[in-house]
Image (cartoon, rainbow, N blue to C red):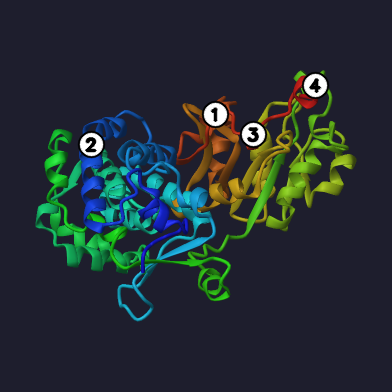
Amino acid sequence: MIFDPFDDYESAGYLRNAFKFKDPEQIKKMEHLAFEASLEEAIALLAAPTRITYETLLELHALLFSDFYPWAGRDRAEVAPRLAVFKGTDSDPRHTAFCPPDQIRHWASHALRLGQDSERFRQQPGEVLGLLADAHPFLDGNGRAILLVFMELCHRAGFAIDWSRTTKEQYLTALSAEINQPSKGHLDHYLKPFVIEVSDRSQWPEILGTIKGLDGLDKENIRYESLDDPEVQKHYTAYRAVPMPLLSILILAGGRGQRMGGRDKGLVRWRDEPLVAHVQQVVRALSDDVVISCNRNQDLYRPFADQLVCDAEADFPGPMAGVIAGLTAAKHEWVVVLACDAPLIERGLIEDLLQLAVANDCAAMVRQGEYWQPMFSVLPRRLLPLLKQAWAAGERSLQKALLLGPVQALECPEGDPRLSNFNSPELLQG
């Protein structure tokens, strides 16, 4: 079966390649040439950023394959959002169902975050490689792009894999097992004997030439099905279901509102409702414990909350005081912290933060470039003693206090509208 997601193989060739090639050998050769021609530039691209993000992966794929595939650098969610991709048939013991398109970014980003926790990654490199392979972000070129990213992550963590000692059959068998049973150690166990001292990046072109199975993620027994098929939908119903733990929501509305001329920000109206109402409508379904930190107008906030808390000190001491009061009152171990003046917050971002926090058993906070955003965070209640201790020592910056302990970053682009703070009259009117 020809992989033809665009349904134009006869006129446009395999995956609309620039030369309209249909012959598999020609296609493999041209992919290889495109990869080799861009390899040194690709290695430099990966070495440059402080953090490797999903956008880095997209940029890498575009650099490697855009001369051959016009859609290079665009993931399956963009170019084939209604197609599920499988490897092998149901009767094949190595049968693999790759990540559904709408979850690609989440799981690839999750893998990249785990891969940049060097201590954890050194112990579980196969888990990260398996998650990236399962994400299967692109219609083709996954193997090479993912292996390059994986090598860079290994390099940053201080080790390498001696790929020359691996075999294609055993590697793909372990990889399939890891994808089908993630985080169970299948690929960790396979890779462990091949861990060596870190390799110099200048050696990577030669090393990549020895890796067997680079095309195994893309060319061998790949098939696709429509996500509109009820049987396919049934298969994906519980895909990587990560049950959300019980959580409390803490909405911070206890500030002076100086940029609002002293008005209570959470009660300022936008689109015919108070700002706090927009936030509450997003989070209401996530928790039975919505806590609002407010230092005035409690009667007006009460309809939007299960609990109200006030700062322990007068004169609006700042968001850290509100967080301490909120964590003290919260019913559940995990607490989502949000600003009352962020009406464009989305449930998906909150769930990403929560999964990041739970997976790493520590606080998680949005970061935009070098800037942390503590008003978009998920905190375990056990941080309460640390925050109280910092407060007693005179610390009033919530960000600085949280960074005293382990924190995972959820990388978001600058200008992300979901993080917009409507904290001045001008922004409300914009």
Q: Any mark on residue 214, and which?
A: none
Mark 3 secondary-structure assignment: helix
Mark 4 secondary-structure assignment: helix
Label 2 or label 1, whichever lies nearer to me, is 2
Label 3 or label 4, whichever lies nearer to me, is 3
Q: Residues within 10 Å of mark 1 (few under 14, many from 20)?
A: few
Q: Position of residue 129 (x, y in %)?
A: 31, 54
Does label 2 or label 4 sit earlier along the sequence? Answer: 2
Mark 1 secondary-structure assignment: loop
Label 3 or label 2, whichever lies nearer to me, is 2
Q: Position of residue 421 (x, y in %)?
A: 69, 30
Q: Residue 323 occupies which quadrant of the picture?
A: top right
| CA distance for labels 1 and 4 | 22 Å
> Is 194 left or right of 50, judged from the image as shown?
left
Q: Any mark on residue 39, and which?
A: 2
Q: What residue would you read off at disc 4? A: 425
Q: Which residue is located at x 38 percent, y 41 percent?
A: 57
| CA distance for labels 2 and 4 | 50 Å
Does label 2 or label 1 sit earlier along the sequence? Answer: 2
Q: Any mark on residue 414, and which?
A: 1
CB under 8 Å between discs 2 and 4: no
Q: Amino acid at mark 2?
A: Leu
CB under 8 Å between discs 3 and 4: no
**Image height check: is 154 above or below 6?**
above
| CA distance for labels 3 and 4 | 17 Å
| CA distance for labels 3 and 1 | 9 Å
Q: Residue 332 occupies which quadrant of the picture?
A: bottom right
**Image height check: is 314 above or below 19?**
above
| CA distance for labels 2 and 1 | 29 Å
CB under 8 Å between discs 1 and 4: no
Mark 2 secondary-structure assignment: helix
